[in-house]
Amino acid sequence: MSGGETRRADHGRVYVVRADGSVVTSAGSRWFHNTSEPMKPGDTIVVPLNAEHIPPLPFWQAVTQIIYNVAVAFLAVHSAT
């Protein structure tokens, strides 16, 4: 009923925080396919963001900056000789 996971969700690390403070992990399988642990009143499902996801624009900005710096260093070394 909350709307589900987003595109940036880390589907492999879903866990549930029980009302008593204990944590139940999915243990390698998707939580909603695991019927051995039923939901209880007060439980909270946590779906963390995928921290390893890099948006395309910052990624390509970093790549082009590295290529530019390598080219400038290469030209600086060759113009000095």
Image (tube, rainbow, N blue to C red):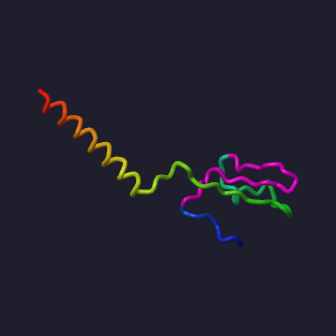
Q: Quadrant of residue 5?
A: bottom right
Q: Is residue 61 left or right of residue 12?
A: left
Task: Report the residue at 39% width, 57% height from top.
Answer: 57
Q: Which quadrant is the N terminus positioned in?
A: bottom right
Please name the residue shown 35% across and 52% down the image.
61
Is 2 placed above or below 30 here?
A: below
Horizontal relation, residue 22 to residue 68: left or right:
right
Question: Is 38 colored magenta in this rendering?
Answer: no
**Viewer-side residue, 31 vs 13:** 13
Q: Magenta segment range?
A: 8-27
Figure label count:
0
Q: Which residue occupies the extreme top position in the image?
A: 81
Residue 60 on image: x %, y %: 35, 52
Apparent side of residue 38 relative to residue 62 in the rendered image (left or right): right
Residue 8 point in image, percent of width and height = 55, 59
* Residue closest to the far right: 20
Residue at position x 76%, y 55% from top? 16
Query: Which residue occupies 22% across, 40% down?
Result: 71
Q: Furthest residue to the front?
A: 80
The front one of 34 and 5 is 5
Q: Quadrant of residue 47?
A: bottom right
Percent coordinates x, y for residue 81 in the rendering = 11, 27
Give the image location of residue 31, x and y in percent.
70, 56
Instruction: State yes or no: residue 12 in magenta.
Output: yes
